[in-house]
């Protein structure tokens, strides 16, 4: 799969857009890696983001993977295209317990309009980084919409 | 589909578990309705929960639907069973713009171990309440796990 | 949701395209209803389409729902647009046992390029028609592709 | 992920069950590889299994991946457990054009009751074997059901 970025300034563009995702700051998540077709986001455990058993809420896990997948898609889009999530599916493999987590997105196929991305969410424990959840997502490039500027 | 609750105190049990989901308080979400196989959660728009275009983040939309679907499933489970999300799929139909939102979950089929639930997320605007996103989820009943008490 | 067909001859167009789906004939499936945004396909049980326990194979169940969903989407598209499946998710609720089955698709949201459709697969037993499986699908309108004529 | 088979005769058990899937014979599909947690099924293009543009029907693509994923899960289950598909999600990346195809399933996480499997469907062209579709599936082990013998 050709994953040459159409915009040489893709990283700057992704980082600027990420900085506008207020939800990422609220989760305490940081954008740690941006490569063509691949993005990594990291976040700490936070007791105020848990579900009833004290694990990170599956929705919070999803939020981080969705952003990682969306920006992985955007890294291959041309300047001026905005990215929107069309759909995603998440399988939860293990409770999200740990001190620190890593969400990553990797483009499988980048089309002109639709991009398919897979995501992972791992607990970073220095001993295998167990897989907590996985995502398959479809992202859409939106153009000529002045109200949607990434 | 028989949706008779196995536990007459299902509502109290769901509300007590919901109160332990710290993530819901962090999102400002409240549990507004609990009926057998059906749960509704409401939340306001919050600028600190947005994606880059200023809409509610798709992950936040998912978080509220996941909780609504999980508790819809739990409302039909017997006392002592904990509920975990196995998987869910979300289709995003429109940007989550609005002042107030409603996430709902409705059980389609309640099995002994697995329950299939559909979810909706709507902008509450008093004029049709447009559909923002829909979910299909599989929830699992977990028993005899003292570490997982709902 | 506005589900006015853009092409008054939508039914004829859907039926002509369906007739070219050789797989439908191979499954013994027939197109029984075509309405704007809604399509129903029926098929009999066939022992040569079963999985290892003698139920209709989940893939056969999916094939019928995919066609029903795809043509439900196409019924709202303008003349000349071809329809392709982008993705679908299937939840299997009960084994596909029975004599006759009905797959249906219903458009939830028809956009210019992407249409979201929900599908159902029921055993037709004259006593409640139990739900066997459900689908959520994204369909895409493809234009200006002479090799893809519906 | 530990993928040691619980039954040393797993291959024989998978092959015997596959031989009872009448739908596989109807599609002309053959079981080409069975390893612990991994199964490959191959099938030729067939004009009687196509959709309206002459490509293999997305449902046929799904049928082969569902069997590959189901048997990948079963290869790790103990003797006497039957396998049923709980749900799957398919992303279609490219039209299924070609002469021969390969569907594969690989277990991501094998639990006692639920197994998560990823599947791929590729056109076998001796030049990269382009990816046509991918699947994420949840498979369930069913025990003590004399009517469900794999």
Image: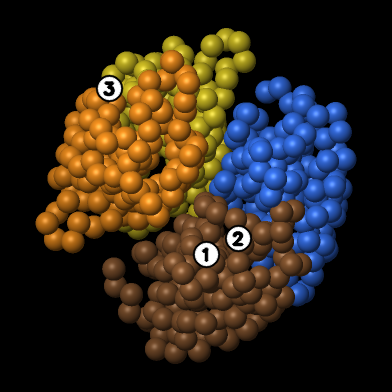
Chain colours: A blue, B brown, C orange, D yellow
Does residue A32 sit above or below B146 in this rendering? above
User: Can residue C68 be seen here?
Assistant: yes
Q: Where does the image place residue C19, in percent across and percent down from the top left?
A: 23, 25
For disc 3, the marked residue is: C20
Does residue A92 sit above or below D131 in this rendering? below
Q: Dot 2 lies on which element?
A: loop
Q: Are marks 1 and 2 in contact (CB under 8 Å)?
A: yes
CA gap between label 2 and label 3 equals 40 Å
Q: Where does the image place residue A125, in percent across and percent down from the top left?
A: 83, 56
Q: Dot 3 lies on which element?
A: loop
User: Can residue D85 be seen here?
Assistant: no
Residue shown at the point (25%, 51%) measured from the top left = C122
User: Which-is-in-front pick, marks 1 and 2?
Assistant: 2
Subunit of label 1: B
Residue shown at the point (54%, 75%) measured from the top left = B41
Q: Dot 1 lies on which element?
A: strand
Q: In front: D16, or B29?
A: B29
Q: Which mark is residue B121?
A: 1
Residue A74: image quadrant is top right
Residue shown at the point (39%, 79%) measured from the top left = B36
CA gap between label 3 and label 1 equals 38 Å
Q: Where does the image place residue B20, in percent across and percent down from the top left?
A: 65, 81
Does residue B82 sit above or below B113 in this rendering? below
Q: Where does the image place residue B76, in percent across and percent down from the top left?
A: 41, 76
Which mark is first along the chain, 2 or 1? Answer: 2
Quadrant in which the C terminus of chain B appears:
bottom right
Q: Residue furthest top?
A: D126
Mark 3 nearby-residue class (10 Å; few <14, some 14–19, many ≥20): some
For disc 2, the marked residue is: B96
């Amino acid at each position: 799969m050709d994953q040459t970025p159409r915009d040489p300034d893709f990283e700057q563009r992704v980082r600027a857009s990420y900085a506008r995702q207020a939800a990422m700051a609220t989760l305490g998540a940081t954008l740690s890696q941006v490569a063509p077709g691949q993005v990594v986001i990291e976040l700490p455990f936070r007791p105020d983001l848990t579900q009833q058993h004290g694990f990170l809420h599956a929705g919070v896990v999803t939020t981080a993977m969705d952003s990682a997948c969306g920006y992985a898609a955007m890294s291959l889009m041309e300047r001026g295209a905005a990215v929107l999530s069309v759909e995603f599916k998440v399988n939860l493999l293990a409770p999200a317990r740990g001190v620190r987590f890593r969400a990553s997105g990797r483009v499988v196929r980048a089309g002109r309009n639709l991009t398919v991305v897979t995501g992972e969410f791992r607990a970073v424990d220095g001993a295998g980084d167990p897989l907590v959840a996985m995502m398959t997502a479809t992202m859409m490039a939106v153009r000529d919409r002045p109200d949607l500027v990434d």
